[in-house]
Every structure is written in C-alpha cells, then in structure tokens.
Image (tube, rainbow, N blue to C red):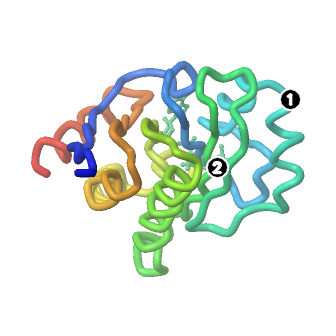
C-alpha cells in the first residue's frame, strides 16, 4: 500500500503553551526535572501535582535530551521535558545541546505516536540562549525531523512578541 506522505506544517503561535490542544507540549526544564520558574513553572501549575510526582520517578535528564510524562490536567496528552543548555558564549557545545533537545523530542514523538507538538523557545529565557540562533536550531531540526517522525503539526509557541517576531523571521527565511 502506498504510504500516505504529508508535508509537516510548522507555525508560530503567540500565547501560553499550557493551553495548546496538541498531542504533546515540550517543557523547557532543568536536569533535575523537579520544576522551576518560567514555562516549567507554568506547565507544572497547569498540569497539577501529579506531574511532579511523575517527574520524580524519572531520575532527572541530561542536558540536550528529553523525557516524557503524561500531561495530567493539561489539554496535551504528553509533556516532553527537554533540558536545554545554559548559554555560556556559544563555544561550550550549547548549539549542539539545544539541537539535541529537538532531536530527542522528535524521537519521543515517534515512540508515542504523537502527530502534533508544541515547543516553547527552549533555553532563551532564564538560560539566556540568543533568540535568533535558538529559533534557527528549532526550525532547522523540526524541518529535518518532523515528517520522518510522523509529526504533521509543529507549533512554536511564543510567550512574548519579541520572540514571536524572531521565529516568524526565521520561519519565513527557511
Ligand atoms: N508558554 C509558552 N512559553 C513560555 C511560557 C508559557 N506559559 N512561560 C514562559 N515562556 C517562554 C519564555 O518567555 C521564554 O521565551 O519560554 C521560553 C523559555 O524560557 P524559560 O522558561 O526561562 O526556560 P529556559 O530559558 O529554557 O530556562 C530553563 O528555567 O524555569 C526554569 O526549571 C527551568 O531551570 C530551568 C530554566
């Protein structure tokens, strides 16, 4: 049987990732996976305490990778907890580690049959990764991996206008 091919749709969305009705939302977590501020805090608040309990069974996650939990009270069925790099000037492997987060999330998407996923701007807040280079990595990895992973819809959910404009510029140039 001819396998149905599709073109993955990548889009920029302004708003709160906890409200996205997609199969999986990605959390910008830290290596403990025990919660934090920023989008990590928002996701834990929205998902409820069962999310922390699930994370406590995961024994953390190395930078540049991601682990999956259920979404609990979130609209999303899954949360992929990605641990981005702290920006340290760009010569300590930060770009490769950030790319690793996206690769790990698409691997988890394929493993769990996820066809729609929403990413925050991983590492660009408290971890100070420059927005432009981070968006370029996000778009490049998503374009390279989404279709092979079976992901039909990728949302880049931006919480502020400045980030949204960067992602729109990068996606427009891609
Ligand atoms: N929805 C979507 N994006 C959000 C939301 C939200 N509800 N809240 C914040 N953001 C955005 C930020 O504005 C930023 O653009 O997510 C992006 C990532 O910022 P951070 O949440 O600060 O994440 P990061 O820079 O990866 O730092 C991770 O912060 O919260 C702690 O535990 C976390 O130690 C880890 C570190």
CA separation in Å, label 2 and label 1: 15 Å
**What residue appears at the point 51 percent right and 50 percent down from the top-left corner?**
109
Mark 1, ligand 1, within 8 Å: the answer is: no
Q: Tell me where residue 56 appears, x and y as whole percent.
A: 88, 50
**Front-most of residues 147 and 38:** 147
Rate crowding at label 2 as few (under 14), some (14 to 19) or many (20 or more) other CA atoms within 10 Å: many
Give residue 27's mark.
Answer: none
Give residue 49's mark.
Answer: 1
**Front-most of residues 100 and 154:** 154
The reply, left or right, for residue 113 in relation to residue 168 is right
Q: In this picture, is 63 found above or below 118?
A: below
**What residue appears at the point 29 percent right and 32 percent down from the top-left corner?**
12
Rate crowding at label 1 as few (under 14), some (14 to 19) or many (20 or more) other CA atoms within 10 Å: few
Query: Of label 2 and label 1, which has the lower sequence position?
Result: 1
Q: Which residue is mark 2?
A: 81
Q: Tell me where residue 42 appears, x and y as whole percent.
A: 66, 28
């Amino acid at each position: 049987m001819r396998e149905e091919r599709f073109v993955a749709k990548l889009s920029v969305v302004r708003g709160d990732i906890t409200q996205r009705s997609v199969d999986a939302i990605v959390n910008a977590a830290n290596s403990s996976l025990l919660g934090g501020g920023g989008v990590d805090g928002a996701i834990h608040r929205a998902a409820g305490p069962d999310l922390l309990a699930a994370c406590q069974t995961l024994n953390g996650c190395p930078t540049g990778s991601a682990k999956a939990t259920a979404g609990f009270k979130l609209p999303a069925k899954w949360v992929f907890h990605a641990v981005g790099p702290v920006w340290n000037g760009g010569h300590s492997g930060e770009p490769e580690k950030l790319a690793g987060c996206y690769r790990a999330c698409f691997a988890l998407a394929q493993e769990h049959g996820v066809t729609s996923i929403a990413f925050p701007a991983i590492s660009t807040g408290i971890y100070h990764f420059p927005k432009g280079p981070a968006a370029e990595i996000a778009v490049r990895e998503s374009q390279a991996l989404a279709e092979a992973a079976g992901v039909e819809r990728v949302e880049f959910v931006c919480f502020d206008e400045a980030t949204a404009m960067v992602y729109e510029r990068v996606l427009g140039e891609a």
